[in-house]
Image (cartoon, rainbow, N blue to C red):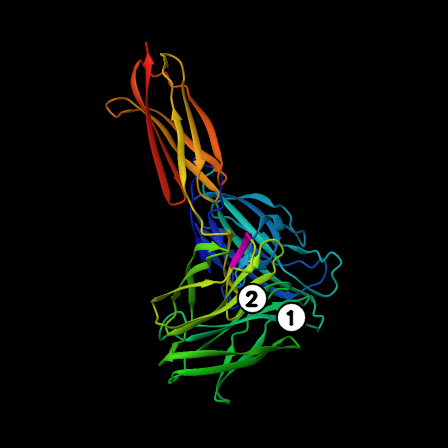
Amino acid sequence: MIINSIINNRSHRIIILLIVILYLIGFKAVTVEGAGLRVSPLYIQKEVKDGEILGPVVITNNSPMDFKVRIFAVTAEHDLEGTVVIKEENKTDMLILENTDFTLKKGGQKEIYPRVNLKGIETGGIYPVLVIDALPVSENGTNVSASFRFSVLTLLTVKDPGESRGQISEVKVEQPDKGEPLTFKVLVENNSKIHRKPVGSVLVYSEGDVIDKIPLKPENILPGNMRWIKGLWKPSDLPPGSYTYKGELYLGNYKLNIPSGKFGIHEPYTLTRRNLELTRVGIPLASVKEGINYRLLVSNEGNIEDTFKGEIRIVSKKNGNTLINKRVSVPEIKPGSSSLVEDSLDASDLKTGQYVFQVVNNFNKIMESREFELLLEKPVVKLAISKFSIPNFKEGKPVKATVVFTNEGNTLLELQGMLEFKDLDGNRVGFLPLKGLKVEPGQSLEKVYTWQGGIPAGLYEGIITVIYGDKSLRKNTSFMIQP
């Protein structure tokens, strides 16, 4: 599979513009062409000895322009889908190359003969990728701000050690869309010294009887890499119900058991999709005397009516101990709908301080974790601006405003807002932001703000607006600037 993309930048520097993505298995192409360049072959698999010469890898220029060519080798790795990942920082000398930079004239051809360098490796395999970068050159000899990349993948066996090691990390049953085949996905890790191609199958059971056998498509996995091994299944008739599966894979001579699992069919040939999401959590009240009030909004993103089962936990922030736990169940949540749960927990045995509110599902997975402060009594949120004054002053002097904030409640207040100066027509002539202010319960905070604005003489109004939590407070005062 080849993906081409061309990108230009302002400085017209060389950017890699052709990204070649190779798949390890089922890769049948032996040549590829781009911008009139042709590279063959793109895939080399063989047993090798140290110093052995590979190739030739032939580069043919059928374009109307010359190309500057650079070649190098990198160590191959691949992602979970088997796509080879090429990183220049993974350069290797396991392929020795001669004449790594050259110009390929239009109509010309170049043969590359990489030499194998085993570097003391006696068993297993090596997996270098030969990378060919080609930069077009215009008729006047200047470089064109586009580059093309070709890659030649190698699977080189030094000596098959015979032994294999690996493990299965995960198994999934998926259905991209209603009516499409089910995909059985097994994530296999190859811990061998050589590439392996797992071979195996999955058995599907209904009420204890085998109803079908699904072959898994063999795919090469490089040493130290993981890859999804997949099998497609679309039976002609599959009634709604619950089904189980298990199977086995052979990684070389090493047997891997695919653990037993379950999947459901919701309606004829539609995979049951259970997906309950905790979309909102609120703690409107948390005090020793009144308890801990909470709200949970559970949404059903699946395709069957479902029941949420889980647990509410109150955990000490200091040591992580669970101090309160309560089972919670939300039945009969229809697909595409939500259900609101409002309840409270007795907090009379707790002390004031910092705690963590957790919602845990039936599989002991934490769906929500939120810190909160437990007060002695119901929180009282009340702020007063007990002083706001701006003295009269001479023109050319800065504006100085004194503000005293008083916390008349029983909880810490964090303040933000703004200080504005306006003329008699309501036009703003000055502005200062207010932020990072904290006032302890029962305490006052005095702040003096200075604005070097150069306001002309006249009568003005100072306005202060403060936001705290979901509340706000506003106060104004007049002042005069004398000529």
**Residue 50 x %, y %:** 72, 59
Q: Which corner quadrant of the image does residue 482 belong to?
A: top left
Residue 254, compared with residue 191, is above or below; it is below
Q: Which region of the structure is painted magenta?
A: 352-357
| Residue 274 image point, x, y percent | 42, 71
Three-letter amino acid code at the position of disc 1: Gly
Residue 354 part of the magenta-drawn span: yes
In-front residue for pair 203/372: 372
Would residue 140 be visible to someone looking at this image? Answer: no
41 relative to 162 in the view: left or right: left
Amino acid type at image mark 2: Arg
Q: Earlier in the sequence, mark 1 or mark 2?
A: 1
Residue occupying image coordinates x 46% and y 61%? 1
| 265 or 200, nearer to the observer | 265
Residue 411 image position (x, y, % from top left): 47, 45
Mark 2 residue element: strand
Q: Residue at x 48, y 89 (%)?
A: 207
Q: Is residue 69 magenta-colored?
A: no
Residue extending furthest left? 425
Look at the magenta stretch and give its main secondary structure.
Answer: strand
Q: What number is the disc on residue 227?
A: 2
Cβ atoms at labels 1 and 2 below 8 Å apart: no
Q: Is residue 218 left or right of residue 379?
A: right
**In terms of secondary structure, where does tag 1 sit?**
strand
Which residue carries the number 1 mark?
Answer: 166
Residue in the foreground of this view, choosing between 77 and 475 = 475
Q: Is residue 351 visible?
A: yes
